[in-house]
Image (cartoon, helix red, strand yellow):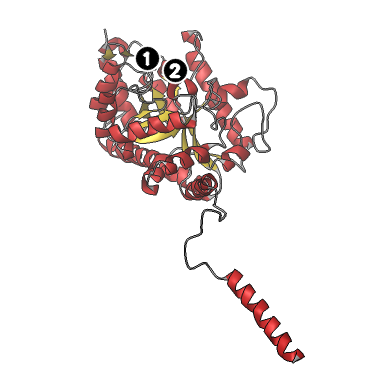
Amino acid sequence: MADLQNDLQTTAEVGELDALSLDPPFPPGPYARAEDPDADLLDRAHALLAAHPVADGYSGLPWALRHLPWYDLELGEIAVDTDVPRMRQGHVGALLCSLHLPEGLAADRAVAATLEQLDLVRTVIASHPEGLRLARTAGQVIDARNCGRTAVLLGPATAAALDDSVSLLRVLHALGLRILTLTGTSWASEAGLTRFGEEVVREMNRLGVLADLSGASERTIERVLAASKSPVLCTRSGARALRPHPANLPDDLLAALGRAKGLCLVPLTAEQTGPTVRDVADHLDHVRTVAGPGSVGLSGTYDAGCAHPQELTDASCYPHLVAELLRRGWPETDLALLTWGNLQRVLRTADFTARAAQERREPSTARIADLDA
């Protein structure tokens, strides 16, 4: 009898363990432990960014580093918003380093100051080989990513750095310049492009230098879209329909940019896109709807002296934005284009256009005095 009781007790215990290990035959009731949906979205965001990292369309890091007596971006640098640990945490695979100059800098210093910044970026890359790698082409961007490095592209630079000389454009390109902002000159102004400006755009196409139209006048944007054989960028432009900032684009220009296969890189700044991550997501939704999913990208605008939205305060925060877009139902295919694919497509197209143009066109010898006299 004692043995029988022991067998029955053992059987009951095993039954209880089996019952605990089996999934319930019906959905859990209202008192069952619910999973945190935000944590799940953030996990999905990290997984997506591991496969499709962020191509950050604008960083003010070069000018910010000029004012620091010492820094180490590989160990981490609290004096700036961007360093190697935070870029890895935020899955930043490519970084466009701005060579823009502060307002008020004398025009006769534009060339020298741009060259100094360009030299600084190259020095920073050389001194941080475990985290950064200079890239000029789409293929080199991929190579850097495959090696676990963040690819750094030089630009955008201000058009004043050309000093009205196509020859200087070639010099800057030989040093690695990849993007030029077409504003603030007599040949790319409120009146649009002059004949010399059109010649600059043609030479940019021949070299593979991308045109950045953020802050350009509507006439300049329209003319560049018509004249350029390569896709163009707007490195810091949101939707003017949502926030009337002068650098944001109206819907007609967003639609034209989409038709031209260009790319609008939405900035993560409180001034242009709003104070919360939801505001930034609203701009991304709008640009995707008007210009198309193939014409929208991201521009962190970190270290550029701008205030940033909540939850997007530095280069580590991109997963929070992607999680918000997942919450809104963005398909992973569109998110892959947003973070990585669209900028890669623009770089590849510019590389192909440049090779084709170099076969049929000699370097330009045009001078502003000859064309715009």
Task: Kindly indicate the quadrant of the structure image that contains residue 287.
Answer: top left
Q: Residue 111 carries which label?
A: none
Q: At 51% from the left edge and 59% from the top edge, which residue is drawn?
A: 28
Task: Kindly indicate the quadrant of the structure image that contains residue 229.
Answer: top left
Dot 2 surroundings within 10 Å: few (below 14), some, or many (20 or more)? many
From the viewer's side, name the closer residue of 104 and 321: 321
Q: At 56% from the left edge and 25% from the top edge, which residue is drawn?
A: 303
Task: Kindly indicate the quadrant of the structure image that contains residue 245.
Answer: top left
Q: In this view, does 191 lie to the left or right of 320?
A: left
Task: Name the spot of residue 327 as percent of width and height, x first.
Answer: 44, 42
Residue 177, placed above or below residue 144: above
Q: Can residue 122 be seen in this view?
A: yes
Task: Name the spot of residue 194 as percent of width and height, x first.
Answer: 27, 14
Dot 1 surroundings within 10 Å: few (below 14), some, or many (20 or more)? many
Q: At 38% from the left edge and 29% from the top edge, which residue is drawn?
A: 283
Query: SS of the residue at dot 1?
Result: loop
Q: What residue type is labelled 1?
A: Asp
Task: Name the spot of residue 361 as percent of width and height, x first.
Answer: 26, 32
Compute the Cα span from label 2 to label 1. 8 Å
Residue 301, placed above or below residue 371: below
Report the quarter where the C terminus lies. Answer: top left
Query: SS of the residue at dot 2?
Result: helix
Q: Residue furthest front?
A: 1
Q: Residue 164 carries which label?
A: 1
Q: Is residue 134 visible?
A: no
List the residue tagged with mark 2. 161
